[in-house]
Amino acid sequence: MTQPNIIFFMVDQLAAKWLEAAMDGICDLPNIQRLKSRGASFTNAITSNPVCCAARSTLATGLTARGHGVIENGYQLDPALPTFMRTLQAGGWRTGAFGKVHLKPHFAGLRPDYRPYGFDVTHITEDARGGEWLDWVASEHPDHYEAVLATIWPTEIPDYAAYDTGHTGQGTTNLRDRIKAIRKDFDWSTPEFLDSTAGAYPLPFPAEVSQTEWITMHALEFLRQTPADQPLYAHISYVQPHGPFCATADYIHRVDPAILPTPLPAEWVEDPNAPGYFRHKTPAKPNWQLIRRHYFADLMHLDHQLGLVMEVLEEQQRDRNTYLFFLSDHGELLGDHGFTGKEERHYDACIRVPLIVAGPGIQQGTIYRQPVQLEDICPTVLDMTGQCFPAMPKMGPYLKVETDQIPQLPGRSLLSLCQENTTVAGWRQAAYSGSYNAIWSIDPGDWAQTIRTDRHRYTIYPGQGGQLFDLQDDPDEQRNLVAEADCTDIRQQLQYQLMELIIRQDYPKTRRSLFALGVH
């Protein structure tokens, strides 16, 4: 058999909870359902760090946040670290990245070069919206350019103050002032959606102009242009359904707001044992029906893109030899527990993410409840393709092991689980998730550290207290048991397990700045 193709169909800020709710009747997702029926679904996949750059760096390298050093947004992944993309590239795969990669901070520039990480072909558009997609709109859809500018929210990115319009021939301009002026007076409401805001609105331009469809266009072109006898890796990664929530009107109409789940209460407000982290916070009161309706509408739009990718794979007869991953980097609270967003609020909708894997030899329609981490994805890809990272450097007579015996990755391939449909010996019994401040904080009290087992979720905020929830009796995480006398033993047991997991975040030893192991 020829070497397999690998495709990541990746969405941004999608919680497993919301995908499950969608498939339980909120909206129709035929292509995700088809992929699920053809592959393995992991219902307890936990993001190791619920923020974009950190989680995506873990996917690329297989390392923990402390292992690769990208502990929060604002750090850049060192391209000298091995990535599975560069390993595949060196092994003969044609590699392409389409959409959001986010291994570099958006403030570092609107035209990031991701080729050093192992991509032959790149067409990048990320949350900031500037760069190749924006230039394409200016060139190919000038009638919609001002509406697109209205959707640009991170205007403080330095490049906008002196924006190079690239191939459009318009030279350099202060696009920041123009965007701010447009947004100041922009009317987000429409006759159909009068309650629209800058945070949730129907796209003010056609779907074919959207980032979503631009990403798919380039991904399909890559699939069609890759020779049939050459294996490929395609990183097809969307900005949606990350906020601002901006779905197309036709999909919004297909979501009935009357059946949307009501946000879970902010239980911490009345909790005398709530961590100090929560004490000075006020529950957010978003128009939850508005944001949830747009979020699920966006999910339908993304489902359609997945269908287009699967159709091209079938047309090319690549589907029989392709591993297709559907995954997300982290979740979105959507008003649950009085919060929107993600980061250090480690509730279910924040840290549990969707993961579906289909391909050769994968048991079809199977569901796995074992704890899985994003660290498992990289070794899974290497296992599927028969590739491996360069050995850790070793010199001198002191380290008495062969180089191929030096551990490199903390995760474990999922392939044996997927293929054998059996319990694999020694699989982890708990998952870890850790936060290291949001971008607006320098407070170590925000460093939420979490262990999640099949029964409990226990989180500590250093110096601030903790949360303990029984996920079996209280799946909505409404009763904090951290101070309950009859939970002392389980709390102490989880504290010990969490301490071990935190220690093991530095295992295996990092290769950052490493000359060699075993030298004097």
Image (spheres, rainbow, N blue to C red):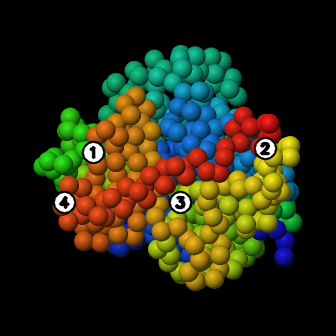
- Work out whether mark 4 precedes mark 2 in sequence or the reverse, and give the earlier one: 4
Mark 1 element type: strand
Q: Which residue is mark 3?
A: 373
Within 10 Å of disc 2 (Cα), the crowding (few <14, some 14-19, many 20+) is some
Tell me how far mark 4 sits from mark 1, CA to CA: 14 Å
Toward the viewer: 464 or 171? 464
On residue 518, the disc is 2
Tell me, yes or no, if residue 162 can be seen here.
yes
Which percent across, then down, holds residue 5?
Answer: 75, 65
- Work out whether mark 2 precedes mark 1 in sequence or the reverse, and give the earlier one: 1
Q: Which residue is mark 1?
A: 465
Q: Which residue lies at the image location 15% right of the left edge and 50% below the top edge? A: 271
Rendering quarter of residue 347: bottom left
Image side of residue 419 versus residue 374, left or right = right
- Work out whether mark 2 precedes mark 3 in sequence or the reverse, and give the earlier one: 3
- Work out whether mark 3 precedes mark 4 in sequence or the reverse, and give the earlier one: 3
Tell me how far mark 4 sits from mark 2, CA to CA: 48 Å
Rendering quarter of residue 283: top left
Q: Which residue lies at the image location 41% right of the left edge and 22% below the top edge? A: 180
Residue kind at label 3, given as amino acid type: Gln
